[in-house]
Amino acid sequence: MEGMMKVAVMTGIGKMGWEERPIPKPADDEVLVKIEYVGVCGSDLHYYETGAIGDFVVEPPFVLGHEAAGTVVEVGKSVSHLKIGDRVAMEPGKTCGHCEFCRKGLYNLCPDVVFFATPPVDGVFQEYAAHEADLCFKLPENVDTMQGALIEPLAVGFHAANQGGAHIGQTAVVMGAGCIGLMTLLALKSMGLTEIYVVDIMPKRLEKALELGAKGIINGREKDAVKEILALTEGKGCDLAIETAGTEITTKQCIAMTKKGATIVLVGYSASGHMDLPVSDMLNKELEIKTVFRYRHIYPMAIEAASSGAIDLKGAVTNVFDFKDVGEAMDLCVKNKADIVKAVIKM
């Protein structure tokens, strides 16, 4: 396919503009996807608001967006498992395939990963994208491309649950009811957990958590989350705590509210990258501390969970914006974090 496409470009901190660029031509092992939905991730907002996340610094012009799904419109000559017209969810990270981590199957830890919207790699706030066919997962008939765009954050939630060894019978607490916290809640529910409590300080996010199936919610601004969890568990503490807010306070609360021998999974990134934690308490409880960096081998599982009805992905979406309004969407998401829990861009 030849021609030009519209691309939404971050031109500076808090600034969006437009460019026309040539429609990319897929390589032999790639497909060309007409993008239909792109989720607005917390990392997109952080880059837009501050220009950096840790060592990753945006140098405008830069294209945001990595949670994408759409329809295949052109197929590379080496691709046999996809055809024109297939709807796909796009796993955004292309790894080297031959390093120590890739060979072990831990490809999310590949040091040479090329990941959409991670500087200096452009994202997919654009009309078309060429992507490795093996990273484009065909969607079942009953999973539309809006849901397909949400497979990416759901994969993070599933990876967090897997890292924590989540299983039926556990009492779990999710700290933070942003998109990743809610996706973690959905993943835990689909894995059979029923005793799931969610902690946040924003009422609308907590309402959404309750709507999506949390057994209980705790407003950490109004109540002592540790005392509440200990009361709910008859003083024992929870079996699993998954921290998605990325703050020192909530991480310390995870340590205090878990029972001995429990597991804590750290997902959220702190603003400073450093925390002062009570290591003695962690040692005394012999806590298992796990961490999450993106995900691996999750997309098929996440798509099956959405297709089976085990997970209601659309229920997590609070706002849908048209592509032509992407600048307004980014501004609103930054300024109204209390109300906009999960936004998607309709291309």
Image (tube, rainbow, N blue to C red):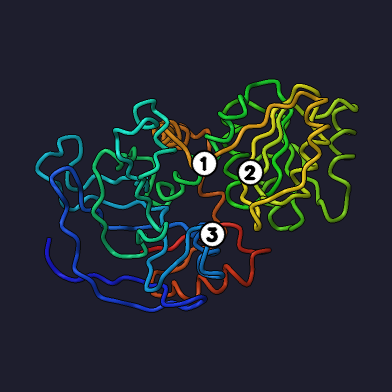
- Looking at the image, which is closer to me, 117 or 309? 117
Point out the tag, 2 or 3, that comes first from the N-terminus: 3
| 1 vs 2, front mark | 1
* Residue type pointed to by label 2: Leu
Whole-number angstrom distance, CA of label 1 to CA of label 2? 24 Å
Name above or below for residue 21 compared with residue 146: below
- The local crowd at label 2, few if under 14, some if 14 to 19, many if 20 or more residues have their Cα within 10 Å, is some
Residue at 85% across, 28% down = 233
- The local crowd at label 1, few if under 14, some if 14 to 19, many if 20 or more residues have their Cα within 10 Å, is few
| Image quadrant where one finds the C terminus | bottom left
* Residue type pointed to by label 1: Phe
Name above or below for residue 201 compared with residue 136: below
Name above or below for residue 303 compared with residue 47: above
Q: Position of residue 189 (x, y in %)?
A: 61, 32
Residue with the mark numbered 1: 293
Residue with the mark numbered 2: 212
Residue with the mark numbered 3: 53
Q: Position of residue 129 (x, y in %)?
A: 26, 57
| Image quadrant where one finds the N terminus | bottom left
Residue at 34% across, 37% down = 140
Q: Position of residue 304 (x, y in %)?
A: 42, 32
